[in-house]
Structures are given as structure tokens and as C-alpha cells.
Image (cartoon, helix red, strand yellow):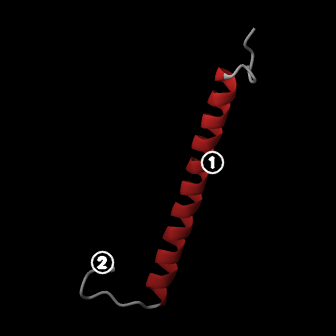
Amino acid sequence: MFPFAFEWAWDISHLVFMGGLWYALSIIGAGMTYCVIKSLIDTAADEAGEGGHGHH
């Protein structure tokens, strides 16, 4: 069942399931966003010559 289906009923089991689903998806999304931003910052620092993890 989907929320846009006609037979959908918002009872406690649906609220708990949908709440857990969106909680998990938001944690995954926040982690991926952090990794992308951190990678961009590290790449910009390496290109500017400020970084250098093991580069001689």
C-alpha cells in the first residue's frame, strides 16, 4: 500500500513504519551529503596545493 492509494489508513503501524523509513533515509542522505561536501573540499584543497595526503 502507498499513501496515495485509496485504501490507505493512517493507523499507528503505518505511522511507525513511515517514520522509521524517513528517519533512516534522512540519516543516509545526511551521510552521503557530508561525504560529497568533504570530498569537494578535499579536492579543492589538493588542487590549491594546501593538502597533500602523501604527495611529495
Q: Amino acid at mark 2?
A: Met
Which residue is rendered at x = 48% and y = 83% of the image?
15
Pointer 2 or 1: first along the chain: 2
The quadrant holding residue 9 is: bottom left
Instruction: State whether residue 53 is above or below residue 1.
Output: above
Q: Classify mark 1: helix, strand or loop.
A: helix
Q: CA distance from mark 2 to mark 1?
A: 33 Å
Vertical placement of residue 49 versus 21, above or below = above
The residue located at (74%, 24%) in the rendering is 51
Residue 46 placed where, x, y %? 68, 23
Foreground: disc 2 or disc 1: 1
What residue appears at the point 49 percent right and 69 percent down from the top-left corner? Answer: 21
Q: Look at the image and tell me in which quarter the N terminus lies.
A: bottom left
Residue situated furthest top in the rendering = 56
Residue extending furthest left? Answer: 6
**Considering only vertical position in the picture, is 34 above or below 22?**
above
Residue 1: mark in rendering = 2
Horizontal arrangement in the rendering, residue 3 relative to residue 30 (left or right): left
Look at mark 1 in the image and give the residue it sits on: 34
The quarter holding residue 4 reads bottom left
- Callout 2: 10 Å neighbours few (<14), some, many (20+)? few
| Percent position of residue 6, x then y | 24, 87
Dot 2: element: loop
Q: Are marks 2 and 1 in contact (CB under 8 Å)?
A: no
